[in-house]
Image (cartoon, coloured by chain):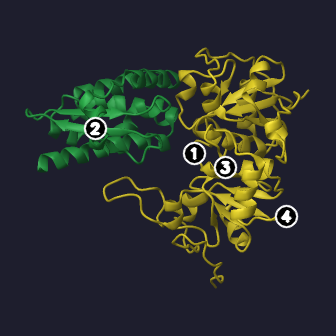
C-alpha cells in the first residue's frame, strides 16, 4: 500500500509533486511500514559517517553498475539488491543524498529503468536534513530480506544510447556540464590524469544548462516558476518536445532528467548515460567547440 | 631486485592492513583513516594560497608538500568532512609518505592506489582521486628539488 503523498505547498506547481517529500514529512513517517529510506551519495563513505535513522545505503558504483561491463545491473541483480534492503515492488522508496541529491536522482532514475512505481526524492537531501539539525545515526539497520521480483530493465523510454542521440540530432539536447566542459576548454594540464575523453566540446545543437542551476542554495529544487524560466525560457524547450540530456557519465544529467520529467512534466525525456566519456572518444561523431550550441551537421556518407 | 619489494615500509604496512580485511571492513578502515587526517598546520591554514587544489577529485581537496632541509618529505592535505573518502585517500598518503626521502616518494609506484584492495570496495573511478593526489605530490617534490 502506497504511503500518502506530501502535499506541502512549496511543491505546488510541479507537474508531479508526489515525487518529492519534505524533511518534516519524512521525519514524521520514519518508521512507517511500507516505506524504505535509501541514501545514495557521491562519496561512498558518507553514509557510514552518519545517516537518517533506518536508512539503507545503495551506492551507484558498487551496487547499481555492472562490475564488468559499462552498463547497469540486470533484473536478477536488482531484485537481489532491493530484496536485501527490505524493499518490495510495492514499497514507497524515498531516496536522499549529498550534492543537491545528484546521486540520489541518479539512483531514482535507475529504479525507474526497472519500473519501480513509487520512488521519491527527499527535497534538499542531506544538506537540508543536516542544516535543520535533524538526527543522524551510525547504526546500520538490519532489514529483513524480502522478495523483489526479477523485472527486466526497460532501456527504451528513459535511456538513450549513442545511436539514439545520432538519430535525435535536430531535436532538443541539454548538455548539463559546466560551461568549460561544454565549450571544450581544456581544464587539465600536461602530466595530470586526463578526463577520460579523447576530444573536448559538445554534441552539436546542445544547449548548456549546468545541472546545478536547478538547485537552490539549501539543496532543494528551485520552485516551478524558476525552473520554467530556465528550461522553457532560456533553454527554449516547448511542451511536447522530445529531449535528451547528457553530461560526462550520465549522473548529473539524471538530476536534470528528474527535473524535466517530474517537476516540469516533459513526457519524453531520455538520459544519455554514455555521455561525454563515450561521445568524446567515439569515432566519427560530430562535435562542436565553443560556447554556442552550433549547427546540426549534414550526415557523413 | 623486484621493485614491488621496494615499497616503503609505511606504505607496505597500510597495504597489508587493507588486504587482510574483507571488503566491507576495508571501508571501515578507510573511514578510520579519514578521521585521522590531521588538521592543517597553522601556517597553511592561514595561507590557503600555498595549497594546490587537486582538480581531479570531485571534493575540494588541497595539498601542500614540504621537503625539509634533511630531505624528508611532509605532506599536508585538507578536505571537508562531507568528503570522507577523499579524506581517507589523503590520510593514507599523509601517513604513508611523511618522513620518507624525496627519492623514496618519487619511487612509489604510480599504481599504488590500485594495489591496496580498494578497487572493488570504492570503485576504480573513485580511486583515481588517490592517483591524482599521489601524482601531484610527486610533481610538487620534483619542482622543489629542481628549485
> What label sits on residue A240 in the rendered view?
4
- Labelled pair 3, 1 in contact (Cβ < 8 Å): no
From the image, state the color of chain B. green
What is the secondary structure assignment of the residue under circle 3?
Answer: helix
Q: Which residue carries the number 1 mark?
A: A68
Residue at image position (33%, 25%) is B39
Query: How far separated are the C-alphas under marks 3 and 4?
Result: 21 Å
Q: Which residue carries the number 3 mark?
A: A214
Chain under callout 1: A
Does A196 sit above or below residue A11?
below
Query: How far separated are the C-alphas under marks 4 and 2?
Result: 53 Å
Residue A50 drawn at (x, y percent): 57, 21
Q: Is residue B40 left or right of residue A84?
A: left
Q: Is residue A131 visible?
A: yes
Quarter where residue A62 is shown: top right
Looking at the picture, do discs 1 and 4 lie on one chain? yes
Label 1 crowding class (10 Å Cα cut-off): few <14, some 14-19, many 20+? few
What is the secondary structure assignment of the residue under circle 4?
Answer: loop
Chain under callout 3: A
Residue at image position (36%, 25%) is B37
Q: Is residue B117 left or right of residue A267?
A: left
Query: How far separated are the C-alphas under marks 2 and 3?
Result: 34 Å
User: Which of labels 3 and 4 is toward the front?
Assistant: 3
Does A263 sit above or below residue A286?
above
| Farthest left residue in view | B70
Label 2 crowding class (10 Å Cα cut-off): few <14, some 14-19, many 20+? few
Residue A289 drawn at (x, y percent): 51, 72
Q: Which residue carries the number 2 mark?
A: B47
Chain shown yellow: that is: A
Chain under callout 4: A
Amino acid at each position: 500500500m502506497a504511503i500518502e503523498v506530501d502535499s506541502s505547498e512549496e511543491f505546488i506547481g510541479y507537474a508531479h509533486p508526489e515525487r518529492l517529500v519534505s524533511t518534516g514529512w519524512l521525519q514524521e513517517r520514519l518508521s512507517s511500514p511500507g516505506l524504505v529510506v535509501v541514501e545514495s551519495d557521491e562519496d561512498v563513505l558518507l553514509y557510514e559517517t552518519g545517516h537518517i535513522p533506518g536508512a539503507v545505503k545503495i551506492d551507484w558504483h558498487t551496487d547499481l553498475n555492472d562490475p564488468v561491463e559499462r552498463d547497469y545491473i540486470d533484473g536478477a541483480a536488482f531484485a537481489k539488491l532491493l530484496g536485501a534492503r527490505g524493499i518490495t515492488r510495492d514499497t514507497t522508496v524515498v531516496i536522499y543524498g549529498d550534492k543537491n541529491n545528484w546521486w540520489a536522482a541518479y539512483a531514482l532514475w535507475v529504479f525507474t529503468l526497472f519500473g519501480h512505481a513509487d520512488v521519491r526524492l527527499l527535497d534538499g537531501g542531506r544538506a537540508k536534513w543536516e542544516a535543520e539539525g535533524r538526527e543522524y545515526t551510525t547504526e546500520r539497520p538490519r532489514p529483513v530480506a524480502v522478495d523483489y521480483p526479477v523485472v527486466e530493465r526497460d532501456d527504451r523510454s528513459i535511456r538513450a544510447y549513442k545511436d539514439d542521440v545520432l538519430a535525435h540530432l535536430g531535436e532538443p539536447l541539454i548538455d548539463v556540464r559546466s560551461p568549460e566542459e561544454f565549450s571544450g576548454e581544456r581544464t587539465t594540464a600536461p602530466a595530470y590524469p586526463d578526463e577520460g575523453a579523447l576530444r573536448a566540446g559538445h554534441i552539436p545543437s546542445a544547449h548548456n544548462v549546468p545541472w546545478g542551476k536547478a538547485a537552490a542554495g539549501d539543496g532543494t529544487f528551485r520552485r516551478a516558476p524558476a525552473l520554467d524560466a530556465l528550461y522553457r525560457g532560456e533553454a527554449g524547450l516547448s511542451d511536447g518536445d522530445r529531449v535528451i540530456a547528457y553530461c560526462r557519465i550520465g549522473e548529473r544529467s539524471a538530476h536534470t532528467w528528474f527535473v524535466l520529467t517530474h517537476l516540469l512534466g516533459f513526457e519524453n525525456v531520455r538520459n544519455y548515460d554514455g555521455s561525454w566519456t563515450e561521445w568524446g572518444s567515439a569515432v566519427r561523431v560530430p562535435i562542436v567547440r565553443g560556447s554556442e550550441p552550433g549547427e546540426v551537421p549534414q550526415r557523413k556518407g | 631486485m623486484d621493485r614491488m619489494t621496494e615499497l616503503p615500509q609505511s606504505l607496505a604496512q597500510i597495504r597489508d592492513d587493507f588486504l587482510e580485511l574483507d571488503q566491507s571492513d576495508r571501508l571501515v578502515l578507510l573511514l578510520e583513516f579519514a578521521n585521522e587526517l590531521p588538521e592543517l598546520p597553522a601556517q597553511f591554514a592561514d595561507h590557503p594560497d600555498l595549497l594546490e587544489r587537486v582538480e581531479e577529485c570531485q571534493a575540494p581537496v588541497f595539498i601542500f608538500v614540504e621537503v625539509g632541509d634533511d630531505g624528508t618529505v611532509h605532506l599536508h592535505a585538507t578536505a571537508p568532512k562531507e568528503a570522507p573518502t577523499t579524506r581517507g585517500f589523503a590520510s593514507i598518503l599523509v601517513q604513508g609518505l611523511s618522513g620518507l626521502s624525496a627519492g623514496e616518494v618519487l619511487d612509489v609506484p604510480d599504481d599504488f592506489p590500485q594495489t591496496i584492495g580498494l578497487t572493488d570496495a570504492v570503485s576504480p573511478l573513485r580511486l583515481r582521486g588517490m592517483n591524482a593526489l599521489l601524482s601531484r605530490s610527486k610533481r610538487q617534490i620534483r619542482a622543489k628539488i629542481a628549485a
